[in-house]
Protein backbone atom coordinates (compact mmCIF):
# COMPACT_ATOMS: atom_id res chain seq x y z
CA UNK A 1 0.00 0.00 0.00
CA UNK A 2 1.38 3.42 -0.93
CA UNK A 3 1.42 6.53 1.17
CA UNK A 4 -0.91 9.42 0.46
CA UNK A 5 1.05 12.63 -0.03
CA UNK A 6 -0.66 16.01 -0.05
CA UNK A 7 0.95 19.12 -1.47
CA UNK A 8 -0.16 22.69 -1.57
CA UNK A 9 1.70 25.73 -2.83
CA UNK A 10 1.82 28.97 -4.75
CA UNK A 11 4.15 30.73 -7.14
CA UNK A 12 5.55 33.88 -5.58
CA UNK A 13 5.59 37.06 -7.64
CA UNK A 14 8.52 38.77 -5.90
CA UNK A 15 11.74 40.10 -7.40
CA UNK A 16 14.22 37.48 -6.18
CA UNK A 17 17.15 39.79 -6.96
CA UNK A 18 16.08 42.02 -4.04
CA UNK A 19 16.30 41.33 -0.29
CA UNK A 20 13.11 40.02 1.30
CA UNK A 21 12.13 38.80 4.75
CA UNK A 22 10.52 35.36 4.63
CA UNK A 23 8.62 33.75 7.51
CA UNK A 24 7.27 30.22 7.69
CA UNK A 25 5.03 29.20 10.62
CA UNK A 26 4.38 25.50 11.02
CA UNK A 27 1.66 24.04 13.25
CA UNK A 28 0.15 20.55 13.30
CA UNK A 29 -3.12 21.81 11.80
CA UNK A 30 -1.84 24.47 9.34
CA UNK A 31 1.12 26.28 7.84
CA UNK A 32 1.51 29.91 6.80
CA UNK A 33 4.11 31.78 4.76
CA UNK A 34 4.85 35.52 4.77
CA UNK A 35 7.01 37.69 2.52
CA UNK A 36 7.99 41.09 3.89
CA UNK A 37 5.44 40.69 6.72
CA UNK A 38 2.55 40.08 4.30
CA UNK A 39 0.71 36.74 4.46
CA UNK A 40 1.01 35.25 0.96
CA UNK A 41 0.01 31.63 1.62
CA UNK A 42 -1.85 29.56 4.20
CA UNK A 43 -2.80 25.90 4.01
CA UNK A 44 -4.36 23.11 6.04
CA UNK A 45 -1.81 20.75 4.44
CA UNK A 46 0.87 20.45 7.11
CA UNK A 47 3.96 18.22 7.07
CA UNK A 48 4.45 15.55 9.71
CA UNK A 49 7.20 16.15 12.25
CA UNK A 50 10.09 16.42 12.43
CA UNK A 51 10.23 19.36 10.04
CA UNK A 52 13.47 19.96 8.15
CA UNK A 53 14.85 22.87 6.18
CA UNK A 54 16.93 22.55 3.02
CA UNK A 55 18.15 25.69 1.24
CA UNK A 56 19.98 25.44 -2.04
CA UNK A 57 20.14 26.98 -5.47
CA UNK A 58 20.86 25.22 -8.72
CA UNK A 59 19.22 24.55 -12.06
CA UNK A 60 17.54 21.24 -11.12
CA UNK A 61 14.11 20.73 -9.62
CA UNK A 62 11.85 18.03 -8.24
CA UNK A 63 8.20 18.89 -7.65
CA UNK A 64 4.83 17.23 -7.38
CA UNK A 65 2.42 17.76 -10.27
CA UNK A 66 -1.24 18.60 -9.57
CA UNK A 67 -1.96 14.90 -10.27
CA UNK A 68 0.29 13.88 -7.35
CA UNK A 69 3.17 12.53 -9.45
CA UNK A 70 6.71 13.74 -9.00
CA UNK A 71 8.38 15.53 -11.89
CA UNK A 72 12.09 16.19 -12.35
CA UNK A 73 13.86 18.55 -14.68
CA UNK A 74 16.65 20.98 -15.42
CA UNK A 75 16.06 24.68 -15.99
CA UNK A 76 18.03 26.07 -18.92
CA UNK A 77 19.79 29.21 -17.72
CA UNK A 78 23.29 30.32 -18.57
CA UNK A 79 23.39 33.27 -16.15
CA UNK A 80 25.33 32.92 -12.88
CA UNK A 81 23.20 32.52 -9.76
CA UNK A 82 23.80 32.80 -6.02
CA UNK A 83 21.90 32.81 -2.78
CA UNK A 84 22.61 35.10 0.17
CA UNK A 85 21.14 34.49 3.64
CA UNK A 86 21.51 37.21 6.22
CA UNK A 87 20.23 35.27 9.22
CA UNK A 88 17.93 32.43 10.24
CA UNK A 89 15.87 32.16 13.42
CA UNK A 90 14.41 28.80 14.40
CA UNK A 91 11.98 28.98 17.31
Image (spheres, rainbow, N blue to C red):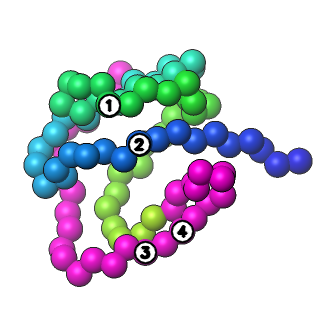
* Tag nearer the camera, 2 or 4: 2
Closer to the camera in the image, 91 or 41: 41
Label 4 neighbourhood size at 10 Å, few (<14), some (14-19), many (20+)? few
Per the image, the residue denoted by label 3 is: 74
For the residues labelled 3 and 4, say whether their Cβ atoms are less than 8 Å apart.
Answer: no
Q: Secondary structure at mark 2?
A: loop
| Mark 2 vs 4, N-terminal side | 2
Q: What number of labels is visible?
A: 4
Q: Mark 2 highlights which residue? A: 10
Residue bearing the label numbered 1: 40
Label 1 crowd bin: few (<14), some (14–19), many (20+), radius 10 Å? some
Q: Earlier in the sequence, mark 1 or mark 3?
A: 1
Decide: marks 2, 3 in contact (CB < 8 A)? no
Q: Looking at the image, which residue is at 24% across and 33% down?
A: 35
Residue pointed to by mark 4: 72
- The answer to the question of whether label 1 and label 2 lie on touching residues, with beta carbons closer than 8 A, is yes
Q: Which residues are magenta?
A: 62-91
Amino acid sequence: MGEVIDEDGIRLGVDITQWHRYRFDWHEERVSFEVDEVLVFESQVSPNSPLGLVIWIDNQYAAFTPEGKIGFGVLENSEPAWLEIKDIDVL
